[in-house]
Image (cartoon, helix red, strand yellow):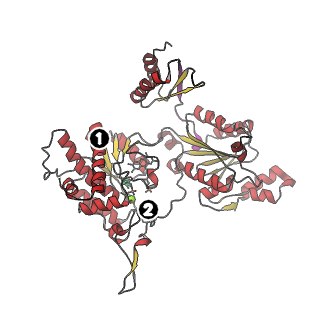
């Protein structure tokens, strides 16, 4: 197998270590999942080109593990056995597209072409073919690698599969060391100064590789492998704006139903909460309400009343949750910075919203002064006013961020009821709500730890958690899921294992 041979013959010890670790990840994945239920996500980029060759070598060595090959390194299969998916997009570079197709044909890779967005494409793929694990060329430092491990289940709200990232810990230097050592073809855009390739709309050659041609005086670019500081790999990529997940279900009811469990984040703005002088009651109230409609709250944060703190948190949460609920810091006071923070998170300016100004004028009458005009300046181009007869002024929604103006639980209840009443496409109750069961045991932590963690593996779709009110007191086990029978089966298993009589 020429890849394995090239690495063995190389005297780059670091590359050998990276290669061996990645091959082990691939062998582990192939031992865990039948090869027909595994896929490879290939897009012709440098990282996925590395992964293609690692998979070719890894599959060969896996066959040796299974006794299906005699380990003769010169032999290799003429077809690549792992199903390969390519999300083809009209905004991909033609060079990337043709490299993907040419590579597939050279290495006997059968490509499944998907023309939808990633999430819908994967939903369709999982429906048509059982797929338990997908190999990806994601590396630490990619924006999408945040929080991922070599084996990471797909995110909540995504179809269920294991993301396998064999090159997660490879550096920019490792990628080029591999491609050059193995002398494998790569897309020639990388020889023209491109160091990371997205779409034609957000990618340019990396300016750090720019040189002036001494003869013609024209600008030229050195090849990607000459970039010395790998941290600047993405210098030719434009920053992505407005990456909210709302777009995944902007066409309303139908897609909300299809997208599995919906997730929410809650952001409270208020220095007083952080000083400990005011207790936040709105966060727990929202958690209860969201849970009651089958949504999952993935995160609750309290941030300082300053524009950057709000912007940073909203920017983070809007791309990982279906909806972000924000409260506090709304009004004409100097500490009311939430709207500006949201605008900054979406990189848009504030702009006078005439409709909202009219609502404020009606509400405040004579008292509507210049401060009202300030309050009517809302994030430009992304603001939607949500009106209901029970609301004195509409609520403000910016893409998937809902700004709640409530300052206490009663006001929040009124705003929540109005939103539910409106049956807005972005806050629909899930078709199934959660079923929760609780059990109490007086066994110690040490006694329940192992049996419970085994049950978590046995019931992967059921949340099994524990809490206690006293360090030495009884432990309450919580079981939760959307399939009542499964929750009951898990409860019986927990009762049996911990010898609890119900
Ligand atoms: C096979 C595959 C699986 C993915 N799984 C997830 C996932 O579980 N969670 C998630 O938030 N995004 C997932 N994504 C999307 C990527 O994290 C990311 O949004 C995408 O690669 C960004 O590409 P873009 O910059 O071209 O939009 C997946 C993408 C692919 C191709
Ligand atoms: N359009 C796509 N089709 C299939 N897989 C994709 C697509 N886009 C991304 N992926 C998967 O996500 C991984 C990470 O993408 P990313 O763009 O960071 O890396 P790359 O394209 O391989 O290299 P580069 O960083 O040079 O662009 C890819 O290696 C691939 O596994
Ligand atoms: Mg890429």
Q: Is residue 95 left or right of residue 364?
A: left
* Residue at the extreme bottom of the image, as rendered: 215
Q: Which mark is residue 231?
A: 2
Q: Which residue is mark 1?
A: 28
Confirm whether residue 184 shows in the render: no
Hey, which quadrant is residue 275 in on the image? Answer: top right
Residue at left offset 70%, top offset 42%: 273
Residue 128 drawn at (x, y percent): 33, 41
Spatial separation of the CA atoms under disc 1 and disc 2: 30 Å
Front disc: 1 or 2:
2
Indicate whether 77 appears above or below 202: above
Confirm whether residue 457 shows in the render: yes
Residue 222 drawn at (x, y percent): 35, 73
Indicate whether 495 appears above or below 390: above
Q: Is residue 355 left or right of residue 249?
A: right
Indicate whether 259 appears above or below 355: above
Q: Which residues are magenta?
A: 424-441
Residue 492 drawn at (x, y percent): 45, 18
Name the N-terminal-most of marks 1 and 2.
1
Which residue is at the front of the view, 333 or 400? 333
- Other-residue count near label 2 (Cα within 10 Å), few / some / many at <14 / 14–19 / ≥20: few
């Amino acid at each position: 197998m020429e890849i394995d041979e090239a690495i063995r013959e190389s005297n780059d010890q670091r590359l050998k270590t990276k290669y061996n670790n990645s091959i082990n990840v691939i062998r582990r994945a192939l031992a865990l999942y039948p090869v027909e239920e595994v896929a490879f996500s290939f897009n012709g980029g440098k990282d996925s080109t590395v992964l293609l060759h690692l998979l070719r070598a890894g599959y060969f060595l896996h066959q040796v593990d299974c006794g299906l090959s005699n380990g003769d390194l010169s032999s290799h299969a003429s077809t690549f056995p792992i199903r390969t998916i390519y999300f083809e997009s009209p905004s991909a570079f033609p060079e990337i597209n043709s490299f993907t197709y040419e590579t597939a044909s050279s290495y006997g890779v059968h490509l499944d072409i998907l023309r939808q967005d990633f999430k819908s494409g994967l939903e369709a793929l999982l429906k048509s073919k059982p797929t338990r694990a997908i190999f990806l060329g994601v590396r630490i430092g990619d924006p999408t690698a945040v929080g991922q491990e070599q084996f990471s289940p797909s995110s909540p709200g995504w179809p269920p599969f294991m993301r396998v990232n064999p090159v997660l810990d490879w550096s920019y230097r490792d990628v080029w060391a591999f491609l050059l050592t193995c002398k494998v073809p790569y897309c020639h855009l990388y020889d023209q100064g491109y160091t990371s390739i997205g779409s034609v709309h957000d990618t340019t050659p990396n300016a750090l590789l720019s040189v002036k041609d001494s003869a013609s005086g024209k600008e030229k670019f050195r090849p990607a492998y000459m970039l010395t500081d790998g941290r600047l790999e993405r210098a030719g990529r434009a920053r992505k704006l407005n990456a909210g997940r709302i777009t995944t279900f902007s066409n309303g009811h139908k897609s909300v139903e299809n997208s599995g469990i919906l997730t929410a984040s809650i952001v409270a703005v208020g220095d007083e909460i952080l000083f400990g002088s005011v207790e936040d009651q709105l966060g727990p109230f929202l958690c209860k309400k969201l849970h009651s409609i089958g949504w999952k709250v993935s995160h609750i944060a309290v941030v300082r009343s300053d524009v950057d703190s709000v912007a940073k948190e909203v920017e983070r949460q809007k791309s990982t949750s279906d909806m972000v609920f924000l409260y506090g810091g709304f009004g004409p006071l100097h500490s009311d910075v939430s709207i500006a923070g949201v605008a900054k998170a979406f990189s848009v300016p504030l702009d006078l919203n005439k409709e909202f100004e009219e609502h404020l004028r009606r509400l405040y009458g004579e008292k509507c002064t210049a401060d009202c005009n300030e309050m009517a300046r809302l994030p430009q181009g992304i603001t939607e006013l949500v009106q209901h007869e029970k609301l004195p002024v509409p609520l403000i929604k910016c893409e998937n961020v809902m700004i709640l103006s409530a300052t206490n639980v009663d006001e929040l209840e009124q705003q929540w009821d109005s939103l539910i009443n409106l049956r807005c496409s972005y806050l629909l109750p899930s078709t199934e709500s959660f079923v929760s069961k609780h059990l109490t045991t007086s066994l110690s932590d040490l006694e329940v730890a192992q049996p419970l963690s085994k049950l978590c593996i046995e019931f992967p779709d059921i949340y099994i958690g524990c809490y206690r009110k006293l360090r030495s007191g009884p432990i309450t086990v919580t079981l939760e899921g959307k399939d009542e029978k499964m929750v009951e089966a898990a409860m019986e298993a927990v009762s049996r294992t911990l010898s609890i009589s119900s």
